[in-house]
């Protein structure tokens, strides 16, 4: 197999594009795709301060690397969620990445600052850990970005993440989430910071290849709570389709964004106002984060059983908040 650009031996095959690249040309391709997403959707400019939500995984570190190399003012935000040994290791690789590049990294300790961990959420409530974790991350990305004066929050969601989220939202006809599943979520209300996903055109396989070629040390293990997650089931289903029909995932996602998402978005109406406790935008009097933090720090076991339904998080569409 030869590189599409320079005809040297190819290292990365992209079946959906019927193409293959050598290491050097693949890095150029990858950065071009990110640059194109930023440009086409006017995600941010070199004058903007960008806060990259980093988890220690390949996607967020690859994104941060691309933005730093492109000269953007991109700092990192790492949230120590308190998930067993996984959090310690992911924090280590993130701090190592930042130190090696002289990049600024903000670290928020969930336990130190808010008195609970995701392990405690799993132990103390019937809530799925990923539900408490996603809520916590979306809230803190927005709150910290607003407090620290950033213009935009960038997350490492890739094409596989977005296609899996879309499949889940379609299977359950979650029209509110479909309305807000987009590469850019504008900061339409006071207190909200714009959210962008510059990797949405690139697959998991491509971000892994980029990270390896660039020598990025990332956490390879999945979060232990990901085992059995619905999002992985949807990814597997889409991978079966992709295997038989290369490009299926991309046309599913990009077709939705182009032809269907605007219709859902036009129908979406929700009123936000400041949380009575923390002041962050919410659809309920007291935001979901404040309710969770209160439940976690209250003594004794929780009495609640079963899942709450129909409560939307105002600061992002529901999905794992960047891996
Ligand atoms: S970190 Fe958190 Fe993910 Fe772990 S607990 Fe679930 S949501 S799987 S991106
Ligand atoms: Zn609140």
Image: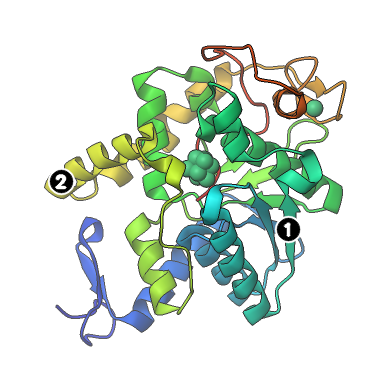
Q: Nearer the viewer, residue 123 or 308?
A: 123
Identify the residue at image location x=35%, y=30%. Answer: 167
Q: Residues within 10 Å of mark 1 (few under 14, many from 20)?
A: some
Q: Quadrant of residue 107?
A: bottom right
Q: Is residue 40 visible in the rendered structure shown here?
A: no
Q: Position of residue 158 (x, y in %)?
A: 44, 51
Callout 2: SS: loop
Q: Is residue 5 above or below residue 181?
A: below
**Label 2 or label 1, whichever comes before in sequence order:** 1
Q: Nearer the viewer, residue 23 or 215?
A: 215
Identify the residue at image location x=30%, y=35%. Answer: 233
Tell me the quadrant of the picture where the N terminus can be found: bottom left
Q: Position of residue 290 (x, y in %)?
A: 77, 26
Q: Which mark is residue 245?
A: 2
Q: Nearer the viewer, residue 113 or 123?
A: 123
Question: Dots 2 and 1: beta carbons under 8 Å?
Answer: no
Cα distance in 3D space between marks 2 and 1: 42 Å
Q: Is residue 103 above or below residue 300?
A: below
Callout 1: SS: strand
Q: Is residue 41 visible in the rendered structure shown here?
A: yes
Q: Is residue 261 left or right of residue 203?
A: right
Q: Which mark is residue 107?
A: 1
């Amino acid at each position: 197999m030869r590189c599409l650009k320079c005809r040297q031996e190819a290292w990365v095959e992209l079946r959906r594009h019927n193409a293959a690249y050598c290491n050097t040309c693949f890095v150029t391709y990858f950065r071009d795709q990110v640059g194109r997403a930023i440009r086409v959707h006017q995600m941010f400019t070199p004058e903007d301060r960008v806060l990259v939500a980093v988890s220690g995984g390949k996607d967020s570190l690859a994104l941060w690397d691309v933005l730093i190399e492109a000269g953007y003012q991109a700092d990192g935000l790492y949230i120590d969620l308190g998930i067993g040994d996984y959090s310690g290791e992911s924090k280590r690789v993130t701090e190592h990445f930042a130190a090696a590049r002289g990049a600024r990294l903000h670290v928020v300790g969930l336990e130190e600052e808010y008195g609970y961990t995701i392990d405690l959420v799993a132990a103390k409530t019937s809530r799925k850990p990923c539900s408490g974790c996603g809520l916590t991350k979306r809230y803190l990305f927005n709150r910290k970005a607003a407090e620290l004066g950033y213009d935009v929050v960038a997350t490492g969601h890739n094409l596989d993440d977005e296609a899996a989220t879309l499949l889940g939202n379609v299977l359950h006809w979650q029209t509110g989430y479909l309305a807000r599943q987009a590469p850019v979520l504008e900061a339409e209300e006071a207190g909200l910071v714009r959210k962008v996903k510059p990797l949405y055109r690139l697959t998991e396989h491509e971000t892994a290849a980029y990270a390896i070629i660039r020598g990025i040390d990332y956490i390879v293990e999945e979060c232990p709570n990901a085992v059995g997650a619905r999002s992985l089931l949807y990814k597997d289903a889409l991978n079966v389709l992709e295997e038989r029909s290369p490009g299926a995932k991309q046309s599913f996602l990009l077709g939705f964004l182009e032809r269907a998402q605007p219709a859902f978005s036009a129908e979406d109406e929700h009123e936000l106002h400041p949380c009575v406790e923390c002041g962050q935008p919410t659809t309920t009097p007291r935001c979901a984060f404040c309710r969770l933090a209160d439940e976690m720090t209250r003594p004794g076991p929780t009495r609640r059983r079963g899942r709450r339904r129909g409560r939307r998080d105002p600061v992002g569409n529901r999905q794992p908040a960047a891996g």
